[in-house]
Image (cartoon, rainbow, N blue to C red):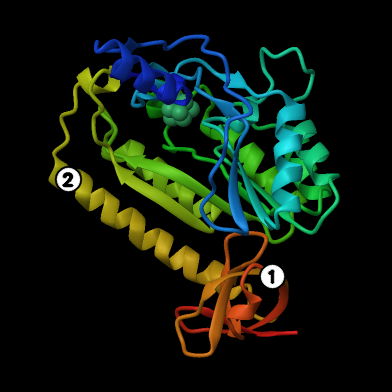
Amino acid sequence: MVFGTQVQYRLPEFIYKRLSGGKRVFDLTLQNAEIPEDQPIKRDGSFKGWLPIMYGCDNFCTYCIVPYVRGRERSRQPERILAEAKEMIAAGYKDITLLGQNVNSYGKGSDSGVNFAELLRRINALDGDFRIRFMTSHPKDCTRELIDTIRDCEKVSSHLHLPFQSGSDRILKRMNRRYDREKYLELVNYAKEQIPDLSLTSDIIVGFPGENYEDFKETLSLVREVEFTSLFTFIYSPREGTPAAVMDDPVSREEKGKWFSELLKVQEEIAERNIRKHIGKTYKVLCDGVGSKDGFMSGHNSGTAVIEFKGDESMLGKFVNVKVNSYDGVLSGTAE
Ligand code: SF4
């Protein structure tokens, strides 16, 4: 049997065809496949869960294979998403992450008239004590309306993961990202102004084909200027079948490794400064694991901070107010 990701839900049918017909089964549907609804769902965990809101991607960043293998963007109907969110809340889920390759373009091309900000507002209005997270955002589709919605909706986490990939406009063009440094900075500065305690995270690719040290320094300067909470950093590696995989890439892996280490060093200093800003503050923390010391539990605040506090496993899956007292490689606090 050979089939693509868009028709995974037809696996039982394919198995039946294979066993009853004795022939090979092929389905290479890539485009316009309907979104399967009403499928049985098995979730890992009992209080943190994923909720897909859209599939595919239309952006064709030159380094990425997703649009070729996952097909074009398709959004689920808002009613379906709301019904699934209600089921999750009723089942005790406290941390729900809305998933899509580019959640900011949710609803485009659909007749529902509901964009991503409106979807967040509708989920936020559901009864229950829970938190909404989402990933991933694309800066070209991130709007002030979305930032205002995060600010105004108390159940939406104060976390924005906004991948900028490179601080150099020249490289952003080669990546086909369709925003520039100025637009990115304008957005993140607005988000920082509007959302107190915002956790701001991002992805960076170091050593994209054609990137030189001057371009890389622009990435470093953006990292210094924004002061991200944390970063997911990667040295570029080619994906066969993408435009970037055949671009000239004269800089050696060794040289890129040096740039990468330089970036990590800058970010480590920023992250340490940022994490200490939590000391003295009280957060609503979802207890989601055991701590690193005996008798301690661990949890996340509405952003990305991990805080440890005295407690036991009966707290798992519950919200606890914790006042942060210290940082010694881990934030520690007292449950109130
Ligand atoms: S990097 Fe993200 S936005 Fe760009 S093509 Fe891939 S999935 Fe789409």
Residue at (79%, 49%) from the top-left corner? 151
Identify the disc placed on residue 113. none
Work out whether mark 2 precedes mark 1 in sequence or the reverse, and give the earlier one. Answer: 2
In this view, the mark in front (2 or 1): 1
Frontmost residue, 59 versus 74: 74
- Indicate the quadrant where residue 75 lies: top right
Q: Is mark 1 within 8 Å of ligand 1?
A: no
For mark 1, what is the residue?
318
Instruction: Classify residue 130 as left or right of residue 173.
Output: right
- Indicate the quadrant where residue 209 lies: top left
Residue at (75%, 12%) from the top-left corner? 111
Q: CA distance from mark 2 to mark 1?
A: 47 Å
Dot 2 lies on which element? helix
Ligand 1: quadrant of the figure: top left
- Amino acid type, mark 2: Glu
Q: Quadrant of the C terminus?
A: bottom right
Q: Tell me how many marks there are.
A: 2
Asked if the residue at tag 1 contacts the one at tag 2, i.e. Cβ–Cβ closer than 8 Å, the answer is: no
Q: Position of residue 70 (x, y in %)?
A: 43, 21
Residue at (17%, 35%) from the top-left corner? 251
